Image (cartoon, rainbow, N blue to C red):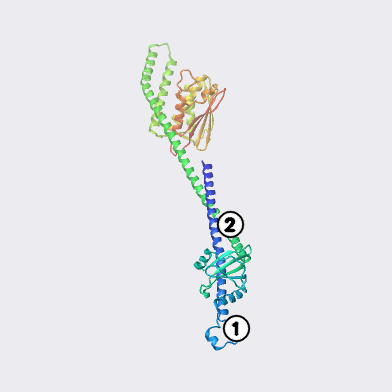
């Protein structure tokens, strides 16, 4: 999921980056067009100012040197030049403007007028004429080296349109400078935008992953809670059934114990120790089970016992219940480690069931308990030499109705596992071979300030 989220995130980043680059390129293209137009417009304003100055300062107040004019000629206005003469003189003077190598005049219809500065140029088309009257100027490219810039001089009262023939080299140099500047700024802007976008997407992906981790953790906790609830439900059902059966057995066992006692009294010389031992064992087991079920149902931790005391109880019960087998307890018997009454009762029931399974498989079984202290847990490893568990049975050992004993119900190990989990522990097969089986019982360790 995390890899898929990162992949989708970076695919989205790549798509967003591509869209951003397309937008940036479009904006740069628009800016390039506008800046190029501004260069030509700047050239137009410069030429218009120079040409109007020439018309005013040098042509309208034209004085003919070396000629003698009479007062009559001055009063009649013959001293002043006609529009055609004005445009001819202004065109000649315009050749002194840098970059201008030709000047062409057109009438408002776009028809050219012969001037000393005229070059071979096509007539102005209708679109250019409309553009000149609309915005004051227009342009066209004459060939690879020249271009024309047309304008409408105000001093000529709309009688003529003027086109200046200019070299393209200075214009191209200005355009190249604009392109280089835009390219540098565009690359810098694109890199900065992509870095910023990457930071934003990295933060977004991190937040999404954090939320996914939180969701996975909540899902895991929910699944664990459901599993624990299911186990608790199963444990409660088995506990209720077991308690019901034990309560039902208690009265018959009491009667059986009285019967065996009376039988021993009537048969004066005949002892029945095996019958009495069996009845007493059953009575003890029933009482222990009922006490454990009672405390488990109420969830009460009335007292705690040390680990050493716990081991002593195990040894005493084993020696009393299983006289033909041997038990060896190894490992830590730390007096600082304590088990509460629920842990001790249920652990004893689990161990008793494991002992019984080993001894049922081999009467003189040798059982070893190895106690190990880990982080906040007591690990008890129970191993025997009773021949191990068949592989096909070991795979589903803790499932109910699975047993290797003839007539066995298979409930013992399933109930033992659920009892371990009900007190926060675990029960599992640690090792299994032809020599014997090894179970691992893990119990949480709590701190008790009062015993």
Q: Which residue is mark 2?
A: 187
Decide if residue 414 is on the left or right side of residue 189: left
Residue closer to the observer: 63 or 176: 63
Residue closer to the observer: 448 or 68: 68
Q: Is residue 175 visible?
A: yes
Question: Which disc, if any, is residue 25?
Answer: none
| Residue that appears at 38% across and 33% down | 298
Measured Cα–Cα span from mark 1 to mark 2: 61 Å
- Earlier in the chain: of badge 1 and badge 2, it is 1
Res 111 → quadrant: bottom right
Badge 1: residue crowd in 10 Å (few <14, some 14–19, many ≥20): few
Decide if residue 325 is on the left or right side of residue 167: left
Count numbered badges in the picture. Answer: 2
Residue closer to the observer: 334 or 138: 138
**Where is 189 relative to 207, above or below?**
below
Which structural element holds mark 2? helix
Question: Which disc, if any, is residue 64?
Answer: 1
Res 303 → quadrant: top left
Q: Position of residue 377 (x, y in %)?
A: 50, 35
| Residue that appears at 52% across and 85% down | 76
Q: Position of residue 375 (x, y in %)?
A: 52, 38
**Where is 446 relative to 278, above or below?**
below
Residue closer to the observer: 415 or 313: 415
| Residue that appears at 47% across and 45% down | 211
Which structural element holds mark 1? loop
Q: Position of residue 381 (x, y in %)?
A: 53, 29
Choose mark 1 or mark 2, whichever is in front. Answer: 1
Q: Where does the C terminus fall, quadrant-wise? A: top left
Q: Is residue 447 visible?
A: no
Q: Position of residue 356 (x, y in %)?
A: 48, 22
């Amino acid at each position: 999921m995390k890899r898929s989220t990162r992949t989708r995130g970076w695919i989205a980043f790549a798509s967003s980056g591509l869209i951003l680059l397309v937008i940036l390129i479009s904006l740069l293209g628009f800016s390039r067009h506008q800046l190029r137009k501004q260069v030509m417009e700047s050239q137009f304003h410069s030429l218009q100012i120079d040409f109007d100055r020439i018309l005013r300062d040098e042509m309208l107040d034209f004085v003919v040197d070396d000629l003698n004019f009479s007062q009559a000629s001055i009063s009649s206005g013959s001293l002043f030049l006609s529009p055609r003469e004005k445009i001819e003189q202004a065109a000649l003077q315009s050749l002194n403007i840098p970059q201008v190598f030709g000047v062409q005049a057109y009438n408002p219809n776009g028809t050219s007028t012969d001037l000393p500065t005229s070059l071979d140029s096509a007539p102005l088309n209708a679109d250019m004429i409309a553009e000149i009257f609309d915005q004051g100027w227009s342009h066209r490219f004459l060939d690879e080296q020249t271009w024309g810039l047309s304008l409408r001089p105000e001093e000529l009262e709309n009688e003529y349109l003027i086109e200046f023939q200019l070299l393209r080299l200075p214009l191209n140099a200005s355009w190249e400078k604009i392109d280089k500047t835009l390219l540098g700024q565009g690359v810098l802007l694109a890199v900065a935008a992509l870095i910023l976008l990457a930071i934003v997407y990295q933060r977004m992906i991190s937040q999404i992953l954090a939320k996914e981790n939180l969701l996975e953790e909540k899902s895991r906790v929910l699944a664990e809670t459901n599993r624990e609830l299911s186990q608790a439900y199963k444990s409660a059902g088995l506990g209720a059934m077991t308690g019901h059966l034990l309560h039902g057995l208690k009265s018959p066992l009491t009667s059986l114990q009285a019967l065996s006692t009376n039988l021993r009294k009537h048969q004066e010389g005949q002892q029945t120790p095996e019958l009495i031992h069996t009845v007493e064992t059953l009575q003890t087991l029933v009482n222990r089970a009922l006490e454990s079920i009672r405390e488990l149902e109420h969830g009460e931790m009335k007292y705690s016992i040390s680990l050493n005391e716990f081991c002593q109880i195990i040894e005493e019960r084993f020696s009393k219940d299983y006289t033909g087998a041997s038990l060896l307890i190894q490992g830590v018997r730390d007096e600082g480690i304590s088990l509460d009454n629920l842990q001790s009762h249920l652990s004893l029931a689990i161990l008793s069931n494991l002992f019984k399974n080993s001894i049922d498989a081999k009467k003189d079984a040798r059982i070893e308990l190895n106690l190990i202290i880990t982080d906040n847990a007591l690990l008890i490893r129970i191993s025997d030499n009773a021949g191990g568990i068949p592989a096909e049975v070991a795979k589903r050992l803790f499932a109910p109705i699975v047993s290797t004993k003839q007539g066995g119900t298979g409930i013992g190990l399933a109930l033992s596992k659920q009892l371990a989990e009900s007190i926060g522990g675990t029960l599992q097969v640690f090792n299994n071979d032809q020599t014997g089986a090894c179970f691992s019982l893990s119990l949480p360790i709590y701190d008790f300030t009062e015993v």
